[in-house]
Amino acid sequence: MTILIKNGSVVTPQGIHAADVLLDGERIAAVFEPGSTTLGSDIEANADRVFDAAGKYVIPGGIDAHTHMELPFGGTFASDTFDTGTRAAAWGGTTTIIDFAVQTFGQRVQDGFNAWQEKARGNCHIDYAFHQIIGGVDDDSLKAMDELVDEGVTSFKLFMAYPGVFYSDDGQILRAMQTAVNNSSMIMMHAENGMAIDVLVAQALAEGKTDPKYHSLTRPWETEAEATNRSIMLARMTGAPLYIVHMSAKQAVRVLQEAKDEGWNVFGETCPQYLYLSLEDHLAQPGFEGAKWVCSTPLRSKAEEHHDELWKYLRTDDLSIVSTDHCPFCFKEQKELGLGNFSKIPNGIGSVEHRMDLIYQGVVDGKISLERWVEICSTTPARMFGMYPQKGAIAPGSDADIVIYDPAGRTEIGYEKTHHMNMDHSAWEGFVIDGHVDTVISRGRVVVDDNTYLGEKGHGRYLKRGPSQYLI
Ligand code: URP
Ligand code: ZN
Ligand code: ZN
């Protein structure tokens, strides 16, 4: 099957240029000037399918480097399966996800990894890879890190939050970082001071402060900035590369920026919720409504002015990637587990479908350039996690993962309208985007076109990743 995408504006981190793109089977065969005769004039006549992308952007498919399909959390499971979650991702122009396989305390890491392979195998609509959560650092799990690198898992997430669940202490983190240096993998960090947070949570509950907004008020920015600093210091002691996930506090990114400026190999990720949503407008909604926006790190106060600072850090590359931390829970029966006690609300927001649109709106609003949109949503995730140029590029030989995006289109986000995630609400209800995902192609297969879903479960393949291309 050959597909010609003609007359579009190809956007990459390097620039925007008018080009036609020829796909042959699962790969990109050629990228050439429109009307170029060097490839012969028969291309269009011979193509099985032709898309006219005049007036539209042609970009590499989105890569969401942080999702949690079916994550066990707080006595329940994230509500998207690999089937429903990757289908929703495809709808929104994401053609690769990296999900987190989980080792819970006491479990063999390999068993956790195999369980995630089982959940995903044959169920994904788009390509997928795994990071591994290490929920209990010990001799066995450190050895397992080496084995997993051979399986294509080259990044490991540790938690400075959630004592008694996923938490690692400083000594454990140090040992895992030393292992990462030896096997050329990346340490990903959930940087929040979980011990301090647990005290603040217990005190708030004892004072009868049980509403969802206390989730944020018991996780002040200092808990994120302190843990960010500590994790960077541990990384410096070991020389390990460090990637801090879901950053929401400008003060924490400032700490990261200083370390980057000093030349340390540290990276930051933020998520759409930290660029648009807030304590006042969302988490503090009356009654239990705010539970929809309980996630960690938490939504922060508008008064503290984080949003604009985070956009700025995206421009300056102090934040390198926007992922979703997609971790959906239904309001009924799942978020409701925390009725009367905010600390029992399962943590997470579902956004896998909306990331490309939400960050494109940042282009429309003048926060980032078009090229930067592609860089932070596709090309850098591919390079950061060892998949480039198979993914994240529009170049001959790369996988034919392409999105045709219409800047004259419009996308109304909301449960009733465009939402395909397995959730009974949307954290993004009412958001309107000045753009639209028109066509999505995953490894040469058209999976979305003209508001119609054409993909299928089982098309997505497991990607064995190499080392981060940011390792030095
Ligand atoms: O609220 C969140 N972030 N839920 C998912 C688990 C995690 O810490 O990433
Ligand atoms: Zn986390
Ligand atoms: Zn997460």
Image (spheres, grey):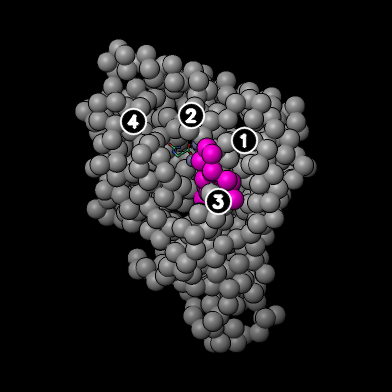
How far is the residue under mark 4 from the one under mark 1? Answer: 25 Å
Q: Is residue 103 magenta?
A: yes
How far is the residue under mark 3 from the one under mark 2? Answer: 20 Å
Query: Image check: 383 left or right of 404?
Result: right
- Helix, strand or loop status at disc 3: helix
Query: Which of the 4 image quarters holds residue 32?
Result: bottom right
Q: In which quadrant will I find the N terminus?
A: bottom right
Residue of label 1: 137
Q: Earlier in the sequence, mark 3 or mark 4?
A: 3
Q: Are marks 4 and 2 in contact (CB under 8 Å)?
A: no
Q: Measured from the top left, where is residue 37 in percent x and y?
A: 67, 81
- Disc 3 marks which amino acid? Asp
Q: Are marks 2 and 1 in contact (CB under 8 Å)?
A: no
Disc 3 crowd, CA 10 A, few/some/many (<14, 14-19, 20+): some
Q: Earlier in the sequence, mark 4 or mark 1?
A: 1
How far is the residue under mark 1 from the one under mark 3? Answer: 15 Å
Q: Measured from the top left, where is residue 159 in percent x and y?
A: 55, 33
Judge by depth and name the residue closer to the eye, 217 or 369.
Answer: 217
Residue of label 4: 344
- Disc 2 marks which amino acid? Gly
Q: Earlier in the sequence, mark 4 or mark 2?
A: 2
Q: Which residues are magenta?
A: 98-110
Q: Is residue 107 magenta?
A: yes
How far is the residue under mark 3 from the one under mark 4? Answer: 27 Å
Residue at 64% x, 66% y: name it.
398
Residue of label 2: 164
Disc 1 crowd, CA 10 A, few/some/many (<14, 14-19, 20+): many
Q: Earlier in the sequence, mark 3 or mark 2?
A: 3
Q: In which quadrant will I find the C terminus?
A: top right
